Structures are given as structure tokens and as C-alpha cells.
């Protein structure tokens, strides 16, 4: 009957969680080591947020997408590594192009695009200084406004005053190699566009230059470390230091194994993935708090109980809520996995895993941590009694 | 006891109703907008670009380039000033690191030289020893200039991107040297990129006073071939206010109307000016809002500086035209036409007039926009087609509805219609609060933001789970229904608060470090956790307390 309350977990479980802690720790260590090994050998499938590069979402103008044909077309463009994946429905795909270096090839691409889009008399050549500079040649004389419009056709944004003032046929544009590398992302988008636009509609593009990718990676790592640290410190203040460390270990466990999932399933590790990792760190601690809270309470209530029994008791008492809170989040995230669409897919899968592993680690890793950190209930009790006496 | 004073109950209800009021426009169809007051109807959550479709750019300003150019000009000015004061020097060199090095022939002239350099720009600082003087801007001045460059670029971008004032782009500073530009509703960015580095067209022209006098303020019927008509900026703004339709016509005219055509067709106040350009904006180095000396009245003025070439032509033109007006034309509008008081030589001058300090700020900004400060390089770009955005909205909505439905189903199933209902009601109120919060804060809802909402739904029933499980436990330990409910609520509360806080830490840090759509996720998740603190500690408590007082239950169907 739906309309009567149900007990998802039987009211009085007496499972010996801590007795299995060696198994659990062994399993977790294995998973974590495998995850780390995976990261260093197979590597993470970094999205363009971190790696730089271009992602283009396309949809076939007619019928289903021909992935093989599209792969051959795009691979032959000379833009370096191009990868393809179907994205959402049958007629859509995501084309990923590697980050562009500002090399001579890119200038040659710009030359082709210029000839195709503006006219045959045009040319783009690397400049005489051999750094980032580029020389444009036009079939007719142009002033600075004409030049600005012309170079913007290949995605180059440059100040008018850096363009020739009078009427000239050539314009040398000074860029640093870094600026040219950023511009080359723009050129690459146009190259892909020209190659596929007869059969495919471009629905969205995303391009991340070399500079910003490195920065995002840097700030992403800091964000994860800062989050873990801040939560551990919070736990330390609210409980004892052992709880803080236990929480930190279980969070690290969750974060590392989540990253392992990204390696295993070759999911895109992008900014959204980072969001998932941080959210998992914050969420997995929820269940840990519930268990720890009860451990603390039981320490006061059952003065004679040893730590392992105390933990077992606390885990069993809180089992129903640990499971139920996880179920509610699990079903919500499952809806995201199934219906949330391709953009949210990696995020949702990671979150789904995070909910499961977070629950598991709250029970075994965080609590087993307390055992190995030699949390001594007697000591705490004595301290508290001492404090109470001092107050009185 | 699980009890609440009446005033608190009333306060909670008012607060919740208020939240509902602010969240309501998000649910109403747009067709009823006309019936509502404008401030209220506009109180909708903005959709992020990934849902609405549009282009997003992160632009980086080349501040080094700007500084180097300034210093090259500075070296020119220092050279000419030193010559004037007859200070002998070997060389004055602009270094690539933003410094100017002056090498004197005679060390004894060092003090005079430094004094002279200060007259070029008082914000310069000097260092070095013996015959070598190292000239640079002070760190404060550099920071100020950097900010000025970015502000100016933002202003120019706004003028360029949003010529018609209807596009509503978001243009904000990001960090030290970056600008975030978001333009909703466009898919083809070619035109936008063309505009990004487009400079405003700034020129100085003499007013043809003969024609102006003859026509007495009205439109002259015939013009000499050397002269044309240009509308004034105030005139155009007045036209925009009084006749928005005409203004739109002017903006959307293709091919674009010449200034003279605008004057003839729409009759805004116009001035006849000579076609010959006295100086172009590309020769203007700087313009800033400042104040006159106290002895002259201390009025707000605009001071400006030309480079060497600009200074020479300006000097000649002003010397010959004292008492006449010099029109400053920006993008086919005259932004001001001050009377030439005296010959302005030496490359810098001031514009006086009846200005408020704010007006001088604006005018200086407009003047500076003639000389666009820095090259803007696109370092990140994304465009989302409107259909893709629509797909995302659809997927997000379905996921949110299904997720919410599943959670409600589980809560009903586990805790029965009554207590499950309380939990689901609290969850609904929580969602309402998040939506209201986002509306009031003007936050954007992105696709990851929807994911954040779905997570909020899943997490916000957790507090009820903790409370109910505790109540079951207390009940099993033999407490009365009332006692169990009270104890259950109170004992569960610390865990509820702790778990919310830890998740909130993650949310806030994510907001700090993330960018773009991820911020949307962090916003909705953090807001959800915050409002959840309210619903868990206050709203749920009110529900339980009210129910208990009303029913005085002896048995709990939990």
C-alpha cells in the first residue's frame, strides 16, 4: 500500500558494519588506487574548458548524421586532432577540435578562408618578423575602416589605428604569438564551418583559447582543495579533530573515485564535471554528519561501550535515514541523467555515482577512519566531564 | 515544546506569501504582462545564454600595448618640453617595460629636468641617479589608467553592440584586464566581431557661424558646399524621448542616413559645420574630467591632450578662429560645441561650459572613445542557437518535473499522506523561495542552474527525513506521540543544520571559482541550501506545531 507509511530499512538492523571494515577499506583503497592509476595512465578526457579548443554542435540538415563521413571530412581539414561524438538525438553530433597553435598552418587556413569568403584576390601570409605578425593583401586599395571590416571576416579583431591609415593594398598586423594563437581558434571555427555547412547546421559553438584553459584548470584545483579543507575545518570545529580527519578522508575517497568514473567511462571532464566533484564533496558529508552526530550522542549515553560497538550501533540506528536521504537525491539525479539532455550528462552520471559512493563512504570510510585515528570515547567523556565540573 | 508564538507563525506566513508574490511572474504567461505593473512583470528570472540562445565572449584587453603607446607619446612630449626649457639631453627613450629613460648631458640640470617632466604629467614619478632619469607612472596611476581603459572599452562596446538600445547586452569587467560580453539572441557572430574593435568616429570641426547666424537656429535652406548639417547629441536624445518611432527609423535605416538627411527629415536641433576635419579622434591621447583652479571659479571642466600631430593642427585652427565655436562630432552627432577662448597650443586644452561633474565625466568618456584604448582579443567564445536553447529548456524542465515527481512519490510512500505531504509542502515552499530569490537578485537561470534546482529538491526533503526517522525512533523507545514529535524535531535539527552548512561551503566556493553557466549552478544550489535552512528550521516547525495543537494526536501514522 502506497498510502501507508513504509519502512524502507527494517527498524532494528544489527549489521556488523565495522567488522567488515577491513574488506571495505581494502576495496576502497583498490578503487582509489585504480582511479589514480587511470588518471595517470589513461588520462582524463578533459573538456575544452580546461584543455582549450573548439566544440561545435551540429545537426544534419536531413536525416540521421553520418558520423563516419563527417569524421573523414573533418579529419582532413588539417586542424590537428578532431573527435566526434553523437550528441543527444540521432541527427546531432559534437565536433571537437584540438586547441590551435598560432603556427604557419593557421595562417594558411586564414588565407583559404579569406579567398573563399571574400574573394580570390586576397591573401594572408605570415609577416616578415616571423613572430605573430601577419600580412593581408587585398585586390583593391582600402582605408582603415575597410581593412577592419575585411580582417574581421576571418575573425580577427584589431584596432583601426593599428591598421594602415591611407589607402593601401597590404596591411601588416602585429600580434604576439599568444594573440595569434587566440585568433587561430576563430580561424579554425570558420574552416570547419566552410567544410560542413552544406550538409549540417551549426547549432552552437564554443571555443576556449590556450590562456583561459590553463587558468581554469589552476583555479579548479584550488577550488577542490579549498572546499575539502573548509569542510574538514568546519567538521573539526563542530566535532573532534578525528571527525574532521575522518570526514576529509571520506571526501577524498569520494572525489578520487568520482574522477575514476570519469576515466572509466571516458566522460568529458569539464567545468560542469568540476561542479559535480565539488557538490559530491559537499553532499557526501551530509550522511557523514548524520552518523557522526549519532556517534557523539551515543558516546554520552553508553558510557561503557567500546568504540567499534559504538560505531556499529550508531550506524545501524541511523541507517534508515542515511539510506532514505540518499534515495531522494538519487531519484532526483536519475531524472537528470535520463531527461537532462546531453549537456548535463557527464555531470548527472558523476552525481549519481557520488550519491552512492557518498553514502557508502559515510558508513565505512569515515567511521573506520575514527577507529584507526584512535578516537577514544573514554578520553572525550573525561574531557567533557572535566569541563562540566569546571563549570559547576 | 514544539511550539511557536502566534506572531512568528504570522511572520512566516507573510514571508512565504511574499516569496510566492515575487516568484509568481515566472509562472505567469507573458500574455498577461500588460495587465500588471511593469516593475512586477519584469520581475522574472533571466534565462542564461545557454537557454535563451546568444553569444558569449570573454575579451582580454592588451593593457601592455596601451601603456607602451602612452609612454612613446610621453617620450615625445618630454623631449619637446626639455628642448623648450633648454635642458640638454643625449636621449629620451621609451622602454618596452612602460618606462621612459632620460639621459641628460649635464647632471647639474637634473632638478630642472625633473621639474620639466612633472609639468608634462604631474602623475609621473622619477627615479634614477646622476644623468639618468627613469620616468614612469606611479602604481596608483597605473591602476587608475588600467581601470580607465577597461571602463572606456566597456562604454565603447556598449555603444557599438547596442546601437539601438534594444539588445540588452551584458558587458561587465572580469578580473583585472578582461571584459565579459554577452549578447542574447544572436547566432552569427561575424557582425559582432566586426563591431568589437570598431572605434567611435570622433572629429573636430569648426562651426560655420555665418550660416548659423543667417538661419537663426532653424534649418538653413541652402548650404555652401563646404558645410554640412549635423544633429546635436542632446537633440537626438530629445528626439528619442519625444518621438521614439522616428528614432527607431533612423537606427534601422538601410543604407544609413547621413547626418544631414536626419536633420532634414526629422528636424532635431542641428548645427552647420565645415566639412574639413580640424583634428581626428585618433590624434586625441587622453581626455579627463577635472576642475578649474579655485581662483577661476573651480567649475567642472574637461581637459584633453593631443599627440604631437594633433596638437599642431589644433593650435593652428584655434589661433585663427578665436570666438568661434568648435564642434566635437562623435558618430555623426555633435556632443558639444564650445567657443574657442584662445589659441590652444602645446597639445592640451580644456573645455569649459555649464557642466555638472557628472556631465564632464560622461563627456570625457565620450571624447576618449574616439581613441579606443586597447585591442580586445577574444579568449573565450560560445554561441548557442535559439533552437538549441529551446531544447535545453525542454530537457531541463522535463528532468525537473520528473525529478520532483519522483521525490514526492517517495516521500508520500515512505511517510504517508500526512507527513509525506508536510515534507512535500516544505519542499514546494523551498523551491518557491529559490525562484523568488533568483528573481529578486536578478540571477540568471542556466541549464546547470536547473540541475542545481533538481538537486535542491532532492536535498530539501532530507531534513524531513531526518526528523521523521528520529520521531519513529523516539516513538519506538516508548515516547508519547507529542513527545516523540518534539524530541525528534529538536534532536534532528543539529544534523540538518550541519549538513546544510557543509554543502553550502561547496556551493559558495564553486561560485567563487566557477564562471559562466557553472555560476548558475552554484547560485541555485547555494540559494536552495540557504532557503532550505529556513524551511527546515522554521517552516516545517510551524507545520508540525500547528498540526499538533490542532489535532492533539495520540498516535502518529508515521
Image: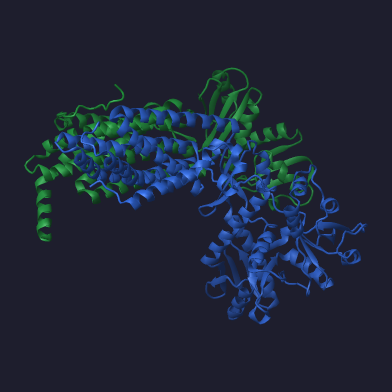
Q: Horizontal and vertical percent for residue B241?
A: 72, 54
Give the side of residue B537 with respect to residue A311, left or right.
right
Which of A178 and B343 lies nearest the eye of the viewer? B343
Q: Horizontal and vertical percent for residue A240?
A: 19, 48
Which of A134 and A189 lies nearest the eye of the viewer? A189
Please count the marks in the image: 0
Does the rendering let one see residue A349?
A: no
Q: Horizontal and vertical percent for residue B364?
A: 67, 63
Q: Residue at x 65, y 53 (%)?
A: B156
Rendered blue, the chain in question is B
Q: Horizontal and vertical percent for residue A102?
A: 58, 40
Q: Which image quarter is the C terminus of chain B in?
A: top left
Q: Is residue A7 above or below residue B539?
A: above
**Quarter-of-image position of residue B500:** top left
Q: Is residue A328 above or below residue A67?
A: below
Give the side of residue A201 with respect to residue B398, left or right.
right
Does the rendering let one see residue B136?
A: yes
Give the side of residue B411 with respect to residue A167, left or right.
left
Q: Residue at x 27, y 41 (%)?
A: B548
State how the image is colored.
Answer: by chain
Give the side of residue B337 with respect to residue B467, left or right.
right
Which of B447 and B275 lies nearest the eye of the viewer? B447
Rendered green, the chain in question is A
Q: Residue at x 45, y 47 (%)?
A: B18
Amino acid at each position: 500500500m502506497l498510502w501507508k507509511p513504509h519502512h524502507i530499512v527494517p527498524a532494528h538492523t544489527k549489521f556488523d558494519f565495522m567488522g567488515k571494515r577491513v574488506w571495505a577499506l581494502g576495496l576502497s583503497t583498490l578503487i582509489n588506487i585504480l582511479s589514480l592509476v587511470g588518471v595517470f595512465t589513461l588520462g582524463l578526457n578533459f573538456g575544452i574548458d580546461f584543455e582549450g579548443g573548439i566544440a561545435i554542435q551540429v545537426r544534419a540538415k536531413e536525416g540521421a548524421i553520418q558520423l563516419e563521413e563527417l569524421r573523414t571530412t573533418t579529419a582532413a581539414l588539417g586542424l590537428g586532432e578532431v573527435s566526434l561524438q553523437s550528441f543527444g538525438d540521432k541527427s546531432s553530433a559534437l565536433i571537437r577540435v584540438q586547441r590551435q597553435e598560432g603556427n604557419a598552418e593557421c595562417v594558411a587556413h586564414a588565407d583559404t578562408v579569406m579567398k573563399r569568403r571574400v574573394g580570390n584576390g586576397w591573401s594572408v601570409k605570415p609577416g616578415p618578423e616571423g613572430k605573430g605578425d601577419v600580412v593581408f593583401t587585398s585586390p583593391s586599395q582600402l582605408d582603415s575602416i575597410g581593412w577592419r571590416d575585411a580582417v574581421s571576416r576571418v575573425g580577427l579583431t584589431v584596432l583601426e589605428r593599428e591598421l594602415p591609415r591611407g589607402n593601401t593594398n597590404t596591411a601588416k598586423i602585429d600580434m604576439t604569438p599568444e594573440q595569434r594563437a587566440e585568433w587561430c581558434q576563430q580561424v579554425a571555427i570558420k574552416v570547419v564551418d566552410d567544410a560542413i555547412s552544406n550538409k549540417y547546421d551549426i547549432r552552437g559553438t564554443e571555443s576556449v583559447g590556450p590562456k583561459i584553459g590553463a587558468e581554469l584548470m589552476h583555479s579548479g584545483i584550488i577550488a577542490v582543495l579549498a572546499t575539502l579543507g573548509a569542510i574538514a575545518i568546519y567538521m573539526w570545529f563542530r566535532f573532534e579533530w578525528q571527525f574532521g580527519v575522518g570526514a576529509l578522508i571520506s571526501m577524498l575517497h569520494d572525489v578520487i573515485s568520482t574522477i575514476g568514473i570519469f576515466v572509466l567511462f571516458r566522460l568529458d571532464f569539464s567545468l560542469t564535471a568540476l561542479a559535480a566533484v565539488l557538490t559530491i564533496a559537499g553532499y557526501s558529508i551530509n550522511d557523514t554528519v548524520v552518523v557522526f552526530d549519532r556517534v557523539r550522542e551515543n558516546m554520552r549515553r553508553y558510557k561503557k561501550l567500546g568504540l567499534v560497538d559504538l560505531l556499529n550501533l550508531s550506524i545501524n540506528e541511523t541507517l534508515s535515514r542515511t539510506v532514505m536521504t540518499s534515495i531522494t537525491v538519487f531519484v532526483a539525479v536519475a531524472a537528470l541523467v535520463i531527461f537532462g539532455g546531453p549537456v548535463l550528462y557527464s555531470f548527472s552520471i558523476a552525481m549519481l555515482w557520488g550519491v552512492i559512493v557518498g553514502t557508502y563512504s559515510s558508513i565505512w570510510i569515515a567511521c573506520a577512519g575514527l577507529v584507526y585515528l584512535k578516537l577514544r570515547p573514554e578520553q572525550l567523556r573525561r574531557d567533557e566531564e572535566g569541563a562540566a565540573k569546571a563549570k559547576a | 515544546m514544539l511550539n511557536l508564538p502566534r506572531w512568528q507563525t504570522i511572520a512566516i506566513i507573510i514571508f512565504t506569501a511574499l516569496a510566492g508574490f515575487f516568484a509568481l511572474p515566472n509562472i505567469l504567461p507573458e500574455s498577461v504582462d500588460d495587465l500588471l505593473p511593469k516593475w512586477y512583470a519584469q520581475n522574472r528570472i533571466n534565462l542564461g545564454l545557454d537557454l535563451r540562445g546568444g553569444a558569449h565572449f570573454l575579451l582580454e584587453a592588451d593593457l601592455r600595448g596601451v601603456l607602451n603607446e602612452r609612454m612613446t607619446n610621453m617620450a615625445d612630449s618630454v623631449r619637446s618640453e626639455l628642448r623648450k626649457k633648454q635642458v640638454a639631453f643625449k636621449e629620451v627613450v621609451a622602454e618596452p617595460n612602460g618606462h621612459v629613460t632620460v639621459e641628460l648631458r649635464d647632471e647639474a640640470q637634473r632638478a630642472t629636468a625633473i621639474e620639466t617632466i612633472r609639468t608634462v604629467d604631474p602623475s609621473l614619478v622619477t627615479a634614477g641617479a646622476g644623468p639618468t632619469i627613469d620616468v614612469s607612472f606611479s602604481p596608483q596611476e597605473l591602476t587608475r589608467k588600467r581601470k580607465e581603459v577597461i571602463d572606456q572599452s566597456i562604454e565603447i562596446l556598449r555603444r557599438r553592440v547596442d546601437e539601438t538600445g534594444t539588445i540588452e547586452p551584458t558587458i561587465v569587467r572580469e578580473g583585472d584586464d578582461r571584459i565579459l560580453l554577452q549578447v542574447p539572441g544572436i547566432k552569427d557572430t561575424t557582425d559582432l566581431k566586426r563591431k568589437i574593435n570598431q572605434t567611435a568616429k570622433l572629429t573636430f570641426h569648426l562651426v560655420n557661424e555665418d550660416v548659423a547666424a543667417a538661419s537663426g537656429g532653424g534649418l538653413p535652406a541652402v548650404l555652401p558646399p563646404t558645410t554640412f548639417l549635423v544633429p546635436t547629441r542632446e537633440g537626438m536624445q530629445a528626439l528619442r524621448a519625444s518621438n521614439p518611432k522616428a528614432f527607431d527609423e533612423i537606427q534601422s535605416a538601410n543604407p544609413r542616413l547621413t547626418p544631414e538627411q536626419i536633420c532634414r527629415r526629422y528636424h532635431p536641433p542641428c548645427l552647420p559645420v565645415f566639412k574639413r576635419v580640424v583634428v581626428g579622434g585618433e590624434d586625441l591621447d587622453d581626455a579627463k574630467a577635472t576642475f578649474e583652479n579655485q581662483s577661476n571659479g573651480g567649475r567642472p571642466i574637461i581637459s584633453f591632450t593631443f599627440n604631437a600631430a594633433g596638437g599642431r593642427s589644433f593650435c593652428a585652427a584655434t589661433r585663427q578662429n578665436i570666438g568661434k565655436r568648435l564642434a566635437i562630432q562623435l558618430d555623426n552627432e555633435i556632443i558639444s560645441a564650445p567657443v574657442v577662448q584662445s589659441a590652444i597650443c602645446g597639445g592640451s586644452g580644456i573645455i569649459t561650459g555649464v557642466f555638472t561633474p557628472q556631465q564632464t565625466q560622461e563627456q570625457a568618456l565620450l571624447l576618449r572613445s574616439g581613441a579606443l584604448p586597447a585591442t580586445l582579443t577574444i579568449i573565450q567564445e560560445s554561441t548557442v542557437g535559439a533552437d538549441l536553447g529551446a531544447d535545453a529548456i525542454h530537457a531541463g524542465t522535463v528532468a525537473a518535473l520528473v525529478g520532483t515527481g519522483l521525490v514526492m512519490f517517495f516521500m508520500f510512500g515512505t511517510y504517508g499522506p500526512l507527513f509525506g505531504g508536510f515534507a512535500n509542502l516544505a519542499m514546494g515552499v523551498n523551491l518557491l523561495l529559490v525562484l523568488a530569490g533568483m528573481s529578486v537578485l536578478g540571477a540568471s537561470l542556466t541549464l546547470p542552474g536547473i540541475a542545481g534546482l533538481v538537486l535542491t529538491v532532492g536535498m530539501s526533503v532530507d531534513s524531513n527525513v531526518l526528523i521523521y526517522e528520529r520521531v519513529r525512533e523516539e516513538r519506538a523507545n516508548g515516547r508519547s506521540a507529542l513527545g516523540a514529535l518534539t524530541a525528534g524535531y529538536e534532536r534532528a535539527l543539529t544534523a540538518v543544520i550541519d549538513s546544510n552548512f557543509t554543502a553550502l561551503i561547496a556551493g559558495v566556493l564553486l561560485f567563487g571559482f566557477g564562471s559562466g553557466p557553472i555560476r548558475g549552478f552554484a547560485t541555485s544550489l547555494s540559494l536552495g541550501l540557504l532557503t532550505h535552512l529556513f524551511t527546515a528550521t522554521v517552516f516545517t516547525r510551524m507545520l508540525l506545531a500547528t498540526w499538533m495543537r490542532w489535532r492533539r494526536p495520540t498516535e502518529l501514522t508515521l
